[in-house]
Amino acid sequence: MFTSEMSSPSQQARERDRLLDIKSPHAAEKADEMDVREKHVLWCVCSFILVLETIDSLVFFGISQALKNFTEVKLGYPKATANAIHSTWRSFGDLTPLLGAYLGDELWGRYTSLAVFSVWYVVAMALVSLSAHPYILENHLSFANAAFLIAIFLGVGVARGVYHPNAVTLGADQFDESETDQKEHFFSYFYLAINVGSSVSFGYLTYLSVNGMGNLIPPSYGYFATFTLSGVLLLLAVLLFVAFSSRVLSHRYVEIPPQEGAFTTIFTSVASTMHECRALVFIAVGFLFFVLSILLNAIALFVGGATGLSHSAGICVCLGVGCWIYKGMDPSYLDGQYTRMPVADMQQILRVLPFSCFLVLWQCTFGQIEANFQSIAQQCDLRLGSGRDAPLIPGAMLGLIDTVGVALVIPLLDYVVLPQLKAWRHRPASPYEKVLAGLTLASVTMLWTGVIETLRRNSGELDLNGPVLETGGHQPMNKFSWGYLVPNYFLVSVCEVLVNVTMYDIFYSNVPTHWKSTAQALNAFMLAMGDNLASIFT
């Protein structure tokens, strides 16, 4: 019977050191290297992980932005089926981080999981590129169909599932428990890397996939060029990442070995203890509600007009959230219970569940903000001049302001605002205070967006000898300039940094060492639940 109290950060540090000392064949050598690495670990060690994450984001969003048009225009699927393939692919990607957590925490370890599936990822991108070659599309369409679907689901979808929980965790593992500030900086730059990669995809690959590149790349080769460029960049990033771990180099990654049963014991412990501790039934039922919501949404994609299924999926998310908050806030009911894992460890995990439920509400709100911003932007005056034929900014491209905002907000908060706040209060802002500030600001931003939309509608249509249409959805533009939306995008970027960056830290720092990848998988899983809940309103 395990009845120990919740482990403190110092206890987690000792557990980390124990795992390195006992299970790593290079523990002594790594210990000697730590003094050399300590001052430069963020840029000399984690930079390779950040590069890998940047390219991973570029590849993923490069495929995502092209997927619907490629399957419809090149592979010949009806529009409804193309949309369903895209949504199913995204839903499948919501579940695969659980596989990544199993491999990283229990089976192979984080580094090995990343290294193996990096090769898997590169091979998948080669298959995606092959399926998009004009010769294959014209002469072997059935092969192109099969190759593309296999590559994006079993290749890219599975590889990203392994990447998501293990890349951020491996990076954070490089820091000692005393290097809290450096670790927080890493989480900030990790999120910035995601934004940089997605910006390149939406800012350049979107154009390349449809229009090509002048005489160098004809439009018919646009998708092939997009996927090939993504694959080549991924290969280079993987080579850098793996080369750094070579014994030829003096610095290598700190690798915390996997622990037998780390991932599966969570589920078996809950299942075996439910008959004695009825409170755990709520935890299990809540998880089943979440899985059911994904299944219902997936079915709704292939059934026309199935709004009832989408609403049911959203209700399942709400029920799951209720179960986890109800029995996760105070898991003291486990005291004195016989479990297959230490009671204190299980209680740590259960205490994270209520916070993860608030992420559902955040992601739902964030998704609505993004959708509403794009809709509003496409109906604003997007001209860069005063004439009817003045060049227009694509409404979707205004989303780049958000990325620029993230790049500005991260150093502003890390090096100016938060240090000043710490000096004033004589203590640093806690992670939960940052998240609360982000959620509060998101609420204000949502209200301000409503004000902006009211002003836009009241401004009336832009009339220059007839309506002026924007280039995306060909909707009439209003007399309301796109410049008024810039503060909204900046506010959203502040919310993102306060919430999304901080939750990496919360999920990493508040669970035992051998469940850190699992916690990051939970992070991704609950954000997906937020998207499911948002389907009620869209």
Image: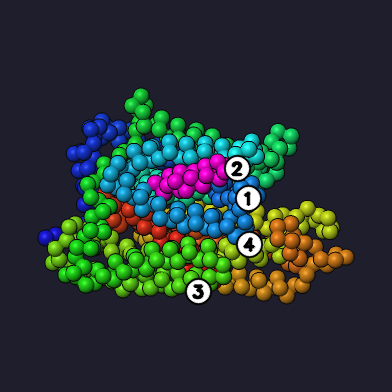
Q: Is residue 39 left or right of residue 85?
A: left
**Label 4 to label 2: alpha-carbon separation:** 35 Å
Q: Earlier in the sequence, mark 3 or mark 1?
A: 1
Quadrant (top left/top right/bottom left/bottom right) for the N terminus: bottom left
Percent x, y of residue 32: 26, 32
- Dividing the picture into quadrants, the one containing residue 464 is bottom right
Please name the residue that numbered disc 2 is placed on: 141
Dot 2, crowdedness within 10 Å: few (<14), some or many (≥20)?
A: some
User: Does residue 43 show up?
Assistant: no
Circles 3 and 4, Cβ within 8 Å, touching? The answer is no
Mark 1 and mark 4: Cα distance apart in space: 28 Å
Residue that mark 1 sits on: 76
Residue 537 falls left or right of residue 168: right
Q: Secondary structure at mark 4?
A: helix
Answer yes or no: do the residues labelled 2 and 1 have beta carbons within 8 Å?
yes
- Asked where in the image residue 24 lies, by quadrant, the reply is top left
Q: Mark 1: few, some, or many residues within 10 Å (few <14, many ≥20)?
A: some
Specify the amino acid type for callout 2: Leu
- 367 relative to 171 in the view: left or right: right
Distance from label 2 to label 1 (Cα)? Answer: 9 Å
